[in-house]
Image: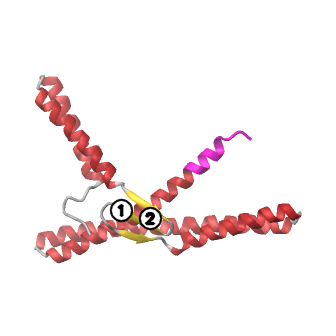
Amino acid sequence: MSTNDNTSTLKSTIDAVTGAAQNALGSITGNTADQTKGEAKQNKAQVEHDASHATAKLPGFTASSSGAVTKDDPDRAAGQYNQTVGSAKEALGGLVGSESLQAAGRNQNRQGQDQEAKGQVNDYVSGIGDRVTGTMGAAVSGLTGNAKAQQDYQDQHDTGKTQQRGAEHDIKKKADAEYDASQRPV
């Protein structure tokens, strides 16, 4: 699934900091070569950071630049379904004047939101766990010279990263929508 030049947020941060330091050192000493190398390292770090976060979010799945594809926790789709049905019931209740149908719709919508959030948290936590296990396992396997296990652990890391990024994408999307809604005049 992945290669040894796998991008990471940590690596891009380290490259950005060392690039900034090299650029500053070049500015202080008047060495334009150091300044240029520092700027180049900072630009490379930005590309690495962007690649580290590159994901494609599809309904029920997430794909990343590493080639990993993950399936969302089932609670995420079930929660979205319950939100949609709940909103429809609430709207229909408003149209026909049924307060009980409106209340049932609001309740189902709220339960769907909770269910989707539970699935997002499950995916996020599971993704972090796979990233940590994959990173540690790959490091140990590399030290012991077990290339097959090292690749398997790297794949686990990549899958976890993809799963985590997919959950982050949906959590951010929801937060942005809630913020936008709060900014609309009443």
Of 111 and 52, which appears nearest the observer?
52
Q: Residue at x 28, y 52 (%)?
A: 10
Q: Is residue 146 magenta?
A: no
* Magenta span: 176-186
Per the image, the residue denoted by label 2 is 124
How far from the left and from the top, in percent, is residue 55?
Answer: 39, 59
Of mark 1 and mark 2, the one earlier in the sequence is 1
Q: Residue at x 51, y 57 (%)?
A: 171
Kindly identify the amino acid type of the residue bearing the numbered disc 1. Ser
Distance of label 1 from label 2 (alpha carbons): 15 Å
Q: Residue at x 26, y 56 (%)?
A: 7
Kindly identify the amino acid type of the residue bearing the numbered disc 2. Tyr
Q: Is residue 181 magenta?
A: yes
Using the rendered view, name the quadrant where residue 37 is placed.
top left
Per the image, the residue denoted by label 1 is 64
How far from the left and from the top, in percent, is residue 52?
Answer: 32, 55
